Amino acid sequence: MWLRVLTVFLLFVAGVCSGLKVTVPSHTVHGIRGQALYLPVHYGFHTPASDIQIIWLFERPHTMPKYLLGSVNKSVVPDLEYQHKFTMMPPNASLLIYPLQFADEGNYIVKVNIQGNGTLSSSQKIQVTVDDPVMKPVVQSHPDSGAVEYVGNITLICQVKGGTRLVYQWRKNGKPVCINSSHSFSPQNNTLWIVPVTKEDIGNYSCLVSNPVSEMESDVIMPTIYYGPYGLQVNSDKGQKLGEVFTVDLGEAILFDCSADSYPPNTYSWIQRSDNTTYVIKHGPRLEVMSEKVAQKTADYVCCAYNNMTGRRDEARFTVVITSVGKCVKEQTFIKHKGLIALVSQMPVKKTT
Ligand SMILES: *[C@@H]1O[C@H](CO)[C@@H](O)[C@H](O)[C@H]1NC(C)=O
Ligand SMILES: *[C@@H]1O[C@H](CO)[C@@H](O)[C@H](O)[C@H]1NC(C)=O
Ligand SMILES: *[C@@H]1O[C@H](CO)[C@@H](O)[C@H](O)[C@H]1NC(C)=O
Ligand SMILES: *[C@@H]1O[C@H](CO)[C@@H](O)[C@H](O)[C@H]1NC(C)=O
Ligand SMILES: *[C@@H]1O[C@H](CO)[C@@H](O)[C@H](O)[C@H]1NC(C)=O
Ligand SMILES: *[C@@H]1O[C@H](CO)[C@@H](O)[C@H](O)[C@H]1NC(C)=O
Ligand SMILES: *[C@@H]1O[C@H](CO)[C@@H](O)[C@H](O)[C@H]1NC(C)=O
Ligand SMILES: *[C@@H]1O[C@H](CO)[C@@H](O)[C@H](O)[C@H]1NC(C)=O
Ligand SMILES: *[C@@H]1O[C@H](CO)[C@@H](O)[C@H](O)[C@H]1NC(C)=O
């Protein structure tokens, strides 16, 4: 036991003090199948040497290391089984592997022995992985026709035709998509489920696929999400919000504009209510009211927005009040200040679904 510890200690000291140092720039090297892979090795020593011996061994997990090739000074002695695959130009200890195959994956051990005033020895291990590069992924959205928010779900599937050890990442507007109550991934991360879909899910989605040797991103896909109407508003052509009072000359038209956010665009209809009856007076986002044609001092209107995909509607009610009506234009001009006042107020919006 003590002898063993002592031996290890002496070997350690010898390795450090010998002046022989073998270094590799990287202990892990990722190669591409079919291509050449170069394993750079540097070594240096400070004693006079007669023989410089370099040995390359290959080991896979749970197997014995096997000899690939070795050299003394400038002459190489390959293992005949592998002589077409491995090249070394001693005293340069670097190894060239060509062509690289999946079977070449494993640990490569290089050992350098210097014969001089005694024998110096040092070794390094390099782990080699072999992969096929990633091909450009393609994203498919299901259902193709789109989904209604809070009702439908969207599944995005990332498909890649070639590549090994693929790692998938979903991106929305260039940023990684996180898992939350409505977003989940398949175990491989190649499928993104959005259950249920909401308006906030609208965006440019892409799939980024990478492996140790390459990385490819799909074209962006924008799933179709039907939503709304939201934020229904009625505005006048004077640019004043409803709820404000504004004057109108007799004969001047007031133009009302109804808008709400939705996809697909809403269809709009305008309803006038007089007495107990309501009737649709116009379809489309704009309504022109000729002040002189308003029969009463007050008139109630409703703008109704309907999204034919979500099946949801919203409406805004408002009342036009004309406080003074003169049929004579001259008189009208005269009383302009006190004027014809259209008092327009927006009543609480009632939502129906
Ligand atoms: C290696 O080279 C050294 C110095 O050039 C020489 O002394 C030695 O004999 C050579 N060894 C072999 C095996 O050729
Ligand atoms: C070993 O050879 C490669 C080219 O085959 C060269 O790039 C590298 O610099 C050489 N290394 C040394 C230590 O001479
Ligand atoms: C060889 O090693 C011995 C003991 O380690 C030392 O005394 C001697 O000087 C060395 N010779 C050379 C040429 O380095
Ligand atoms: C969306 O997914 C939920 C949960 O899996 C399911 O209950 C619902 O039927 C799906 N909706 C549609 C439109 O497929
Ligand atoms: C889940 O995360 C996505 C972005 O990763 C975000 O757009 C969405 O609003 C989030 N949903 C919830 C319910 O937090
Ligand atoms: C899937 O993605 C999540 C979050 O982006 C990540 O934590 C996880 O390691 C990924 N799983 C696989 C198998 O790549
Ligand atoms: C999505 O991409 C389209 C076209 O490339 C662009 O017009 C739009 O602004 C993008 N949307 C977001 C949320 O980045
Ligand atoms: C309107 O309806 C109410 C109750 O439904 C009724 O009492 C009233 O007489 C009706 N008015 C007119 C003008 O029809
Ligand atoms: C729904 O409305 C959109 C735009 O308003 C229109 O283009 C489409 O034809 C309508 N679809 C149906 C099924 O009515």
Image (tube, rainbow, N blue to C red):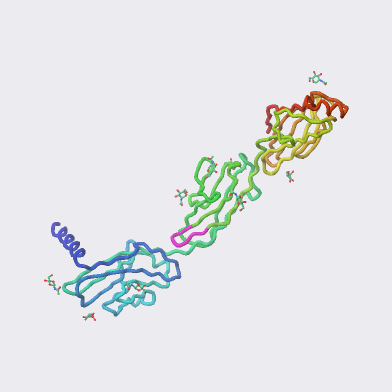
Percent of width and height locating residue 121: 22, 69
Q: Which residue lies furthest to the front in this view?
A: 334
Q: Residue 292 sits in which quadrant?
A: top right
Q: Which residue is painted at 47% across and 55% down in the image?
A: 167
Q: Main secondary structure of the magenta part?
A: strand
Above or below: residue 79 compared with residue 274: below
Q: Which residue lies furthest to the right in this view?
A: 328
Above or below: residue 326 compared with residue 96: above
Image quarter for ligand 2: bottom left
Q: Residue 238 sits in which quadrant?
A: top right
Q: Is residue 298 shown to the viewer in this render?
A: no
On the picture, is 282 further left or further right than 349? right
Q: Is residue 238 shown to the viewer in this render?
A: yes
Q: Which residue is painted at 66% across and 36% down in the image?
A: 231
Tell me if residue 211 is in the magenta stretch.
yes
On the picture, is 187 further left or further right than 243? left
Percent of width and height locating residue 310: 67, 40
Say which quadrant the N terminus sits in.
Answer: bottom left
Say which quadrant the C terminus sits in.
Answer: top right
Q: Residue 98 sits in which quadrant?
A: bottom left
Percent of width and height locating residue 145: 66, 49
Q: What stretch is highlighted in magenta?
A: 210-216
Q: Which of 47 and 353 is in front in this view?
A: 47
On the picture, is 25 further left or further right than 20? right
Q: Which of 246 and 15 is in front in this view?
A: 246
Percent of width and height locating residue 67: 30, 71
Tell me if residue 100 is in the magenta stretch.
no
Q: Which residue is painted at 23% across and 71% down in the image?
A: 113
